[in-house]
Image: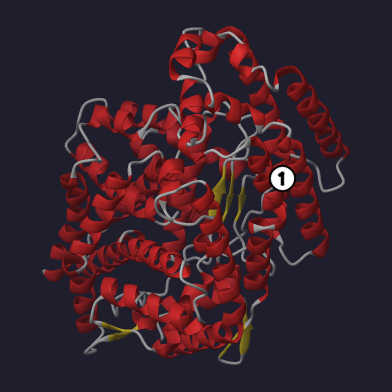
Amino acid sequence: MNRVESLGSLPEWDLSDLYAGLEDPALARDLDAAEVEAKAFAGRYRGRIAELDGTALGGALAEYEALEDRLGRISSFASLSYAADMADAAIGRFYQTTNERITAITSELLFLSLELNRLDDAALAAKTQAPELAHYAPWVDEQRLMRPHQLSDEMERLLHEKYVVGRAAWTRLFDETLTALRFEIEGEMSALEPALNRLSAKDEATRAAAAAALARTFRENLRLFALISNTLAKDKAIEDSWRRMPSPDHARHIANQVEPEVVEALRQSVLDACPELAHRYYRLKARWLGKPALEHWDRNAPLPEADDRIVPWPEARDIVLDAYGAFAPEMRRIGERFFESGWIDAPVRPGKTSGAFAHPTVPSAHPFVLLNYQGKIRDVMTLAHELGHGVHQVLAGPQGALLAGTPLTLAETASVFGEQLTFRALLDAERRPERRKVMLAQKVEDMINTVIRQIAFYDFELKLHRERASGELTVERLGQLWLEVQSRSLGPAIRLNDDYASFWCYIPHFVHSPFYVYAYAFGDCLVNSLYAVYQRAEPGFQDKYLELLRAGGTRRHEELLAPFGLDAGDPNFWRQGLGVISGFIDELEAF
């Protein structure tokens, strides 16, 4: 039995809950109807937002929300179809054409947030006394965060309409280029996801060959990746300048509804902890592997005690659902729907996007999860992570299209918590010391990847965007910046050679969502602190946690964490979260 067969039958998602296919007449009807409705909405309300009373304005937002749900359904179907097969030219054309059509339709709706932002605070407060508008107050508040950075109506419309042939087009070029890359490893041609998977193979020669193949193909394409990165950084700098953003990452802080000083406290806490966490752990790992120092392809190598056991899909399903159910039966019930209803796409396929994600789609439908499942314990943890997102999205769905979504910093809460539940369940069930060592080591590595590496990614982005202000960065300079931040974060126990200087080029978050990456570190430390509260057997913890997830985007992090006695503005909050990682390393040192 080969490796793929040993995984069992892997599910592929069924997108028919959105539309039956690219040619579904319902899709064309919905697009046409949305265009008519958007124009009618603009005809009724453009230029009149200030004169509406609270009841009428609340009614207008309800109409707008229904339009957002319809357009979100179309957009989600196009995005998910494209993610499943980026190599199909017909799907690519459909994806681009649909996005262009939606951009044109939503141009008619831009006036709403622009006019809301021009309202005087006192006038808006008076309108919000009406229950119809009070319901949407968190969404209105979120829009008004951009008030200091709002441009003229004409400029806002220009930026909106050009996006689909600007940033979005460069992002599509990046995605399709990355998906098409092939890596020759030990005589076999491999796509990106299986090539990266070999970096965690037990055999060192396989890891080294995979690393060399990745570097070789990356180098052949670096000029294109550098062009994409330089262009997008300049594009962002131009818009940031017009909007008077004080720093390259400030727009992300606004979108995340988090104060810059909170993010800086997180960043500095992580950087200060690198010697105690990553540097210390990799010294241990080098000793376990019998080396004076690790090569970069050893970073995710399994320990000598680890086995090569493949976790079949049915077992992975049970591991995650059992862990969820032991915490809260409602989480298990929601999770089961993903497996039973065709909401998961798990196999590795040519043309499929790499990595994993959970797409919320719209509240009138349900989320979908994409994985590239290859049967390792890390893949089980990825399933737990993405299913956590999915459960969160289902629970928040009743808030509606405008209020269900959360800032990225809070969006990672349920996913990382789901991983933690799954890991703790497996660890508690394991009695063999050598297996516990392997599990703890893998968890520490995952946490280092989530916290230390993501903050290093954040620093790389900061350096890239700041230097781009003085001119285009060469391939060599990008490699230097990458090695600088990686060396500082990982420490002297890992040797980073010239080949590794190219590994910045495949990180999709740099292209898709600038400065997204710190949200992972935020979420991991937040969950570590939350889990510590849970371990103290605080009464009613599960109910409060599920309430946090149900809140969606209706409350900010201060409000959501207050019932647990936590404050992300306190530097001790981050140190407490990082202390969990340190505690695991303490345990490993005792082996």
User: Is 238 left or right of 493, judged from the image as shown?
Assistant: right
Q: Choose top left, top right, bottom left or bottom right for residue 376.
A: bottom left
Q: What residue appears at the point 76 percent right and 53 percent down from the top-left corner?
A: 95
Q: Position of residue 451 (x, y in %)?
A: 31, 59
Say above or below: 180 vs 583: below
Label 1: which residue? 77
Q: Assess disc 1: are there few (<14), some (14-19) or many (≥20) residues with their C-alpha within 10 Å of its C-alpha.
A: many
325 vs 308: above or below: above
Quarter of the image with the N terminus is bottom right
Q: Nearer the viewer, residue 457 or 120?
A: 120
x then y, percent, for residue 323? 37, 45
Screen quadrant of the C terminus: bottom left
Residue 372 appearing in the image: no
Q: Nearer the viewer, residue 278 or 460?
A: 460
The correct choice, above or below, for 202 with respect to 327 in the image is below
* Residue 226 in the image, given as x and y percentages of width and height: 56, 75
Does residue 531 appear in this view? yes
Q: Horizontally, is 506 left or right of 90 in the view? A: left
The residue positioned farthest toward the left in the image shown: 590
> Where is residue 565, by image quadrant?
top left
Total labels drawn: 1
Amino acid carrying label 1: it is: Phe
Work out whether residue 205 or residue 63 is closer to the camera in this orientation and state it. 63
Considering the numbered disc 1 on the image, is that residue within a helix, a strand or a loop? helix
Which percent across, then down, holds residue 166?
A: 67, 58
Left or right of 100, for residue 48? left
